[in-house]
Image: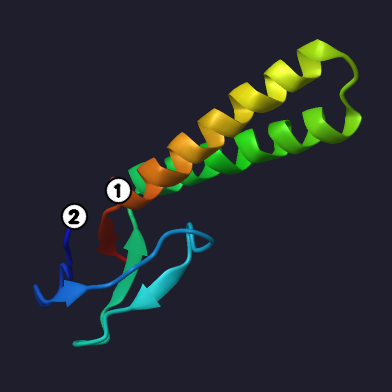
Amino acid sequence: MKLLCPHCGQPVKANPIGRWYARFLCPHCKGKLQFDSRTNATGIAGSAAFFVMAYAIVMGRGETAWYVAAAAGVVWIATLAASYFLRGIVKG
């Protein structure tokens, strides 16, 4: 999905991974931009799934912990991909 600056309409390359809720500037017009709420929500869900996965791996005992870790890992990868492919930007 190609992102366009809402200020000037020029294409913007923006990677949401690790930059949720952060403001950034359009490289063309220097207008303030920010990822939309959908992108931020999937990023936060992915972060939560990552911590559940890590906790299950480190602290879990038994077979159930590995199922929880595997399920959380799948959710983490899916939400991480979704935050990138469903990304959108708004005026910051």
Residue kind at label 2, given as amino acid type: Met
Q: Secondary structure at mark 1?
A: helix
User: In the figure, is residue 68 to the left or right of 82?
Assistant: right
Q: Secondary structure at mark 2?
A: loop
Residue 64 x/y as whole percent: 78, 12
- Where 31 falls versus 86 (above or below)? below
- Spatial separation of the CA atoms under disc 1 and disc 2: 7 Å
- Where 91 falls versus 43 (above or below)? below
- Where 18 falls versus 64 (above or below)? below
Q: Residue at x 37, y 41 (%)?
A: 82
Residue at the outermost left position? 9
The reply to whether discs 1 and 2 touch (Cβ–Cβ < 8 Å) is yes
Viewer-proximal residue, 65 or 87? 65
- Classify residue 68 by image quadrant: top right
**Which residue is tagged 2?**
1
- Classify residue 52 by image quadrant: top right
Q: Residue at x 19, y 87 (%)?
A: 29
Viewer-proximal residue, 32 or 63? 63
User: In the figure, is residue 58 to the left or right of 41?
Assistant: right
- Classify residue 26 by image quadrant: bottom left
Q: Residue at x 75, y 21 (%)?
A: 66
**Which residue is tagged 1?**
85
User: In the figure, is residue 23 to the left or right of 90?
Assistant: right
Q: Please identify the quadrant where the C terminus is shown.
A: bottom left
